[in-house]
Amino acid sequence: AGGKVLPLGLSPRRNMCIHPTIAQESDRVAVDAKCRSITASWVRQRKEQDPSIEVCDFFDGFDKHGSQSLLAAGVYTMDDLRRLGRERKWCPYFTARHMIRYANVIVYNYAYVIDPKISMLVSRDVEKESILVFDEAHNIDNVCIEALSVNINRRTLDGASRNVATLTRAIQRSKEENAEQLRAEYQRLLQGLQGSGALSGLPGAAGAVAVTDQHGGDPVGFAGELDELVPGDIMQAHNFVGFIRKVIDYLKERLRKAKRVEQSDNQTLVKDLMRSMQLPEPKSLRFAAQRLKSLLHTLEVVDVDTYAPASLVADFCALVSTYTQGFSIIIEPFDERLPNVPDPILHLACLDASLAIKPVFDHFQSVVITSGTLSPIDLYPKLLNFVPVTKCFDMTLSRECICPMIVTRGSDQMPLNANFQNRSDRSIIHNYGRLIVELCSVVPDGMVVFFPSYRYMEEVVSSWANGKVLESITSHKLLFIETQDVVETTLALENFKRACDCGRGAAFFSVARGKVAEGIDFDKHYGRAVVIIGIPFQYTLSKILRARLDYMKEKYQIEESDFLTFDAMRQASQCVGRVIRSKTDYGLMVLADLRYSRADKRSKLPSWIRQYIADKNMNLSTDMAVSAAREFLSKMSCPLSLQGQVGTVLLSVEDIQGDGVTPASVAGGQEGGAG
């Protein structure tokens, strides 16, 4: 590239803001609201008449100079963009948004491409010829499903009712103080939502929304459909608010009447809703989300996140009236954990991940899906409904620096099997405790233990506390436990690392599918061993999961057992993969359950893990596992010379600077990929 490449990253305002006051806020909603309050187009217009009104100097600097300029070639991290913003008085967030269309490499969150509400605003300028890479994409099907799913409970509907009351007052106030606002919006809507640019902010469109005023695209993402005129029954602001109020009342009544679990498809609910509201066609429902965004813009609402409940209802209307397949409506009258406490919730559950990813495949010519735990890859083409070209790379290591082992028996030779029927067995819990205690006595520095669920972790830890197992663990290492509170878990992680740094050593109890299992690296001395207790299957009695399993079997011929095992093993792979994060790292991977020794489970582990499972380590007791761990750690304690790795595992300076990089020297990936 000769220094002409321009890579940059994009992150939410909270991570990029350099305004001296707003940057101190830690809450995303607060940062977004305060940013809009000093950058919105109408605020800046009023500034021209009233100099006392506060605006953002950094956005003004960007608007006057940065929006017409290009960044010099080079790699820009978020720190670099913030530093550049301070030097030139440009807003880093809007500078990055502006430069997306000129950058060679763009790094941002999945949601910026997959979630239609965000991708229509952020990613529409990315060229079709671009190569789109989804890294760490083992859970991409779940990300797609979450992007198109909506959950509504009574608290959501109460909040939406308050939003409607606030909007009603704002509309009345606008009629009295500035009736031209609503008349101008009405004229724009006569031209169609998209054609006028009133919502999309399309460059050059008459009346296009300024970039500072945009706050979410269409939840469905089929922008072309918005060329149609807005239905007349929701074109007037007061009519639209009345329309949303009726939808809210209908949903409240459905939740109030729910006495048992109800399940239906989208078409059934839409017909019932249309009958209740006396709608001749569902078109008004389809336009609800964009009509609400237009109204919030017209009323010059800054803190749009306070209208999240009403936006959620409007998104529900758009989604339920657009899709006829791949969704299920599930109403649950109470939480299964508290069956005596009425807490009804309505799920609009997306069952087909391919619905969210299809616009991405249609837009980009080349899409690469890659992850170290993507293999076995056979189910992903079915889940995402595409035909891939696949390529898997072996991990190249200078020595066997990972030691996967399967522990099937306790010290008393009793089988270790934490399935749902056996997991409360006291002897199994005790044997797991002895395994952890023994490993803590031989593993230096940090050790991480993963449980299948929070509930099981609480049960086991409580039993260990009564049996003095925890006392034995803490005699070797300090103990820290993940909770469902983000702040508590963050604090526990910080202290865990401090204990490892000072040489005291620590054990961290976590949950598969939790925040730690996905997003935290236990590299170097922070993770010399990872133990996973049981197999992290999903909760199979979940009504949403049952609906998805039935749908996948009917449409894609994916058997229930195949998907559940595939999903559990990719989660297990993610957990044990926390232990090795570089070629010089090393660690133990302990799979503590009899079921891991079965071929149907073991075969679904990534090849870079399977190839290091020695036959002698496939059926170990606790004593044998501790002996194997001691032998492996003793071997790893020997110094490693990096010089002998150059040309095979590591690239030399000449390899990097020149063009003569051989295939053998670049095979050092642990990824499997599909494109």
Image (tube, rainbow, N blue to C red):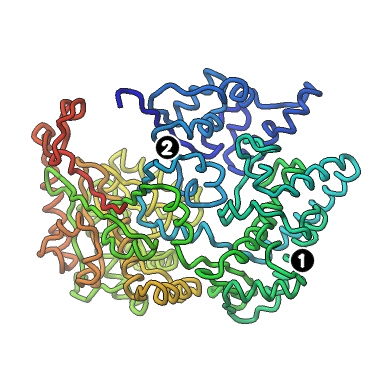
* Point 13% across, 58% down: residue: 628
Please, what is the three-letter code of the amino acid marked with disc 1?
Lys
On the image, numbered disc 2 is attached to which residue? 106
Q: Where is residue 514 in the image (x, y as percent from the top left)?
A: 42, 57
Task: Please tell me which residue is depicted at 79% across the width and 47% down the height of the picture.
Answer: 186
User: In front here: 482 or 17?
Assistant: 17
Residue most extreme to the bottom: 260
Secondary structure under tag 2 reads: strand
Name the image quarter holding the N terminus: top left
Q: Residue at x 74, y 58 (%)?
A: 231
- Residue 309 in view: no
Q: In this view, does 551 lie to the left or right of 522?
A: right
* Disc 1 residue crowd, few under 14, some 14–19, many 20+, Cα 10 Å: some
Q: In this view, does 383 lie above or below 98?
A: below
Quadrant for residue 232, please give it. Answer: bottom right
At mark 1, the secondary structure is: helix
